[in-house]
Every structure is written in C-alpha cells, then in structure tokens.
Amino acid sequence: MTAIPAGRCADLAEAAGDPGEGTAPPAERWLLIEHPGPWGRVALKESGLDPGAVASLTSWAARVDGRIALVRRAGRRPGARDRPSRWFRIDARPGHEGIRTGEFTDAAELSRVPDTPGHVMSGPLVLVCVHGRHDTCCAVRGRSLAAALAEEFPDATWECSHLGGCRFAPSMVVLPHGFTFGGVRPDEAGDVVHRYLRGTVGTEFLRGRSSLSQLVQAAQQHARAATGATGIDALRLVEDVRDSGPARRVRFAEPDCTVYLRERHVPADRRLTCASEPVSAIRVFELLGLEYPGSRS
C-alpha cells in the first residue's frame, strides 16, 4: 500500500509542483460582508449572522454566479463594535468591473444589501484568505501576507474567509477584476498590487480571473505567457469551443491568440486541504498548442 505523504497541503502542493493556472474561484460577482469574527468553518452559515439574512444572500449569489466572503481588517481581533459594518458588492465581469460599498446595522439591512445602491468606490480591494478554521495553511501563510499588504495599502487590504484552492496558500484576490494569486510572499505582494494599479498583471503567481471558467482561465494564462500581453483587460474572450474528443479551442482578441488545451487528471494521493481526506488525482489543464501572430505554424 502506498504511503500517504504527511504535511500541510500547501507544502505538499509546492513539493509536487502543482500548476496554479485555472484554479481561481469562479465568480462573476462578489459580496463582501464585514464581520470581525470568530468565523465558523462554513463562514457565512456558522459565524453568528442572522439565518434569514444568510438565506437571502445565498439566494442572490446563486442567481448571479456570485461569491460571498466575510472580511475584516488585518490583525484586528474580535471585540465590541461601535460603528456600522461595511459591505462591498463587486461586479467582476469583463467590461463591467466596479465596486459599490455601504454600511448595515442589522439583519434587515444586511438582507437588502444585494439591492442597495450604495456608493461607487474607486478601488481596488485586496483580499487575503486567513480562514484558519477552514484550512491551517491559509491562517499560517495568509496572516503575514495580509499584515504586509496592510502596511502599504491600509485602506484596500482585508483579511477574508475561505477563497478556495487552499493548497496554493496564501491566496490573494485583487478586485474588481477578480485576479487570484497563490504563493505570493509578503515581500513580493506590494509589487503585485502596484502592477495592478498601473493596469498590468504578471503570470508568476496568477491562478486566474474569477469571472472566467477555470479552463478559460488556464487558456488565458498560457496566452499571456506566449504573447507577452500584460494588460489587465488584454486577451478578451471571443469563443470557447470543444474540438474533437476532449480538446478545447479558446480564442482571444486584443491581441489575437488561439489556445488548444484539454482537461485531464493526474495522480496525487494526498490532501488538497489540510482538513480533507486524500484524493487520488487532481485536475490539470494540458496545453496542446497556441496560434498567434508571429508564432510558427
């Protein structure tokens, strides 16, 4: 019988060289709810929020392909609140990016947040997963990253509940575009945010953009690497079609690039989160080919 490797999920993923492309949590819209904690393992349902409000927000998320996260300021410990809590509603769809924000004081106001106009916020927002009750790696690796970012970007940075892809901890999302990064060290994170503020994004830590399907995320990342396109709005999706068999053809514009890839599973025999049972295989997106102006046919 093959021995199951011990250790934390992020350490195991690093040792195995797990590819991060195509692993951003899918979401066209985000809703962030300020909550100082403690957060339960299932943050929205197990953190003391009103059940009626939770049901209303969950219904909204299902309708709009949304994701809800609890947020708090970095390093702040739970305590008595002397002010209203904040909310942020983000549209991460290409061409519709934007952030609106407001406050709530009770369950009734919280329930109405999806339909509340709020105020336009120029952004960005930077989220770092520190959800220790969901995964140890997120807490251990995320808190130092959040603290470093908060020193440089105090208004933009928030600790957040579970994002997904714990084995790529620390996980970081930059909104409104929904770019998700993994494995960023505290001394490197500021550069990632500064690049975003300049309108560019690199691929070194990039896992994908939340508003795209995970296969298209992987295709776009391969297209960025091949064409050298760094603009946050570069490589607009034109089509995603299935060719013969399992192959997929994804075509982008600005600049033009066509990516051929397929989804497959490779052996793993390890945990993908610290709290889960081992899995036998993980999904990857295998690059089959690229076509773009200047490439060899």
Image (cartoon, grey):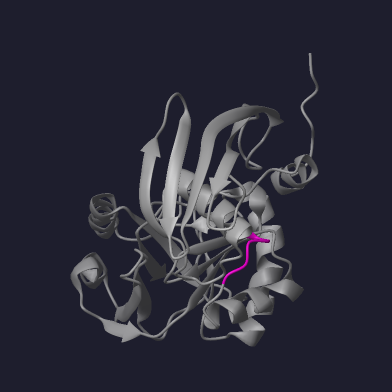
The one nearer the camera, 236 or 45, is: 236
> Residue 248, image x and y in percent?
45, 36
Q: Quadrant of residue 207?
A: bottom right
Q: Which residue occupies the foreground of this view, 146 or 200?
A: 200
Residue positioned 79% across, 32% down in the render: 5
Q: Residue at x 58, y 41 (%)?
A: 289
Q: Which residue is depicted at the point 45% across and 55% down?
A: 43
The image quadrant where one finds the N terminus is top right
Is 296 displayed left or right of 45 in the figure? right
Looking at the picture, tell me which residue is in the foreground, 234 or 115: 234
Residue 47 in view here: no
> Left or right: 193 with respect to 255?
right
Magenta: main secondary structure: loop
Give x and y (percent) for residue 285: 57, 39
Does the stretch in magenta take in 25? no
Residue 273 figure quarter: top right
Callout count: 0
Position of 189 relative to 82 (above/below)? above
Up-down: is 236 above or below 187?
Answer: above
Vertical placement of residue 222 versus 202, above or below: above
Q: Position of residue 119 (x, y in %)?
A: 28, 85
In which quadrant will I find the C terminus? top right
Q: Position of residue 83 (x, y in %)?
A: 38, 85
Please report the bounds of the magenta region as a residue range: 201-206
Look at the image and tell me whether residue 17 can be seen. Answer: yes
